[in-house]
Amino acid sequence: MTGWDIIMLQVQGPLTVPRSVLWVKRQRCAVCLEPARALLRWWRSPGTRPCTPGADACSVPVSEIIAVEETDAHGKHSASGRWQKMEKPFAFTASRPKHLLVFINPFGGKGQGKRIYERKVAPLFTLASITTEIIITDHANQAKETLYEINIDSYDGIVCVGGDGMFSEVLHGLIGRTQRSAGIDPNHSKAVLVPSTLRIGIIPAGSTDCVCYSTVGTNDAETSALHIIVGDSLAMDVSSVHHNNTLLRYSVSLLGYGFYGDLIKDSEKKRWMGLIRYDFSGLKTFLSHHCYEGTVSFLPAQHTVGSPRDRKPCRAGCFVCRQSKQQLEEEQKKASYGLENAEEVEEWQVINGKFLAINATNMSCACPRSPGGLSPAAHLGDGSSDLILIRKCSRFNFLRFLVRHTNQYDQFDFTFVDVYRVKKFQFTSKPTEEEDSNLKERGKQRFGHICNDSPMCGLSASSSSWNCDGEILHSPTIEVRVHCQLVRLFARGIEEKPKRDPHS
């Protein structure tokens, strides 16, 4: 059984009977529950007589039995074939949530968040005996503010219904609340942040749902709800972004300067256009073709066992994330004992130049439009970020680079693109007034009739802004640090699709 195969469990008699009948894809099987090992075992049993398991017996770990379909000795259904929810679910582990705090953004994406939750998610939570407290947000940052104010000890997790912006609100509220309780100052760029014990569940209802797509592999609401119900857990890295010893924001997906920073800044002025504003602003930003000069300094992630171009994507039970986490903990132990400080041993690398874009991703940033994402081999919990530098090039070459995000070709296979796996990086812009003046005149001559209302499109800006998970950071000079597996989601990672047998 893989994924979410639908099975029917028919129990003849009370639940204490260890053997019953299991129907798997219309095949009759005998099933045995082993409470001591929390295993559900089944094997083919065409007849009605009891039989012993053979070599083809299968088993799966079971965390909890929530509902069963009972039949009497003659095979008649006791309630018209409907599942009978148990008054006291039979639990084997404590990982499944019982009480959740749910935030719903009724305005995000296409404004379908409340409808999606009520029609697709709430009925599943009810069947799973999960109680909820629902807060429908009516202004920005309400979820973040609420998490700072209320007592969250009674909840087993936080669920956000909306897009990536809603998730970011919950993320900032939960991390901030946890650091405040631990007495840690998040404005200190070298502070070791404390992970929260609560997991975050994402019910996708936004425009791109990048975080959900990159951690689950789909933006389907029911699938995300099932991950929450069964209590899946997935650790994820978080980057802190500082400027002059002040925390600006946390980032889990894209931190982009240049192209993506200009795009999000321009799109904010055109919210009246709806979701099409991203396409329109993207075209304007592409035509502007503005380069930004600056210095990038970074500390390579020597503890990781993968690389950005090894074509090994992060998947459920990821070996790279496990090994990288272990090696990073070994480095931290040595530093705590005074044996060696990794940052003193390793050398920072410095790159100066003119860049069309500077992108840092903690995950693949995949979405339906770009199934591979900005960095297909980025890992969710290896304590690193993939730093992508796109140097100055022609519009045609930059277009080739962008197009490769939508196909299977290597988007890093260009002479003007460099990619590094890092655990820290800094950027400092270098404004050049004389060059900006020349760029402005050339830009007005070529594209002034298209976007003369924007200084950015007229190529007059000396520095760009940072796009931090869809929010604008106006300071070009920043310091970024990756915190390994700081938060946990109700997810298990993207699962590999089983390969089909060509002879079947």
Image (cartoon, grey):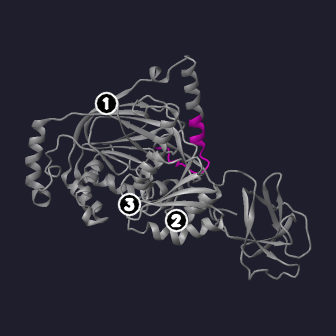
Is any atom of residue 408 visible in this view? Answer: no
Of residues 417 and 331, which is closer to you in this image?
331
Q: Is residue 201 left or right of residue 261?
A: right
Residue 221 is tagged as 2
Percent coordinates x, y for residue 301 in the rendering = 47, 33
Mark 3 element type: loop
Report which residue position mark 1 lands on.
244
Of residues 240 and 345, which is closer to you in this image?
240
> Farthest residue in the front direction?
150
Mark 1 element type: loop
Measure the alpha-carbon separation of dots 2 and 3: 22 Å
Q: Is residue 37 left or right of residue 338?
A: right
Image quarter of the N terminus: bottom right
Circle 2 packing at 10 Å, graded few (<14), some (14-19), many (20+), is some
Magenta segment range? 309-325
- Identified at 47% across, 31% down, the residue is 184
Measure the alpha-carbon separation of dots 1 and 3: 33 Å
Image quarter of the C terminus: bottom right
Percent coordinates x, y for residue 55 in the rendering = 84, 60
Which badge, 2 or 3, is on the more N-terminal residue? 3
Percent coordinates x, y for residue 96 in the rendering = 66, 54
Mark 2 element type: helix
Report which residue position mark 3 lands on.
138
Name the amino acid type tagged 2.
Ala
Percent coordinates x, y for residue 429 in the rendering = 24, 35
Do labels 2 and 1 touch, CB within 8 Å?
A: no
Name the amino acid type tagged 1.
Asn
Do labels 1 and 3 touch, CB within 8 Å?
A: no
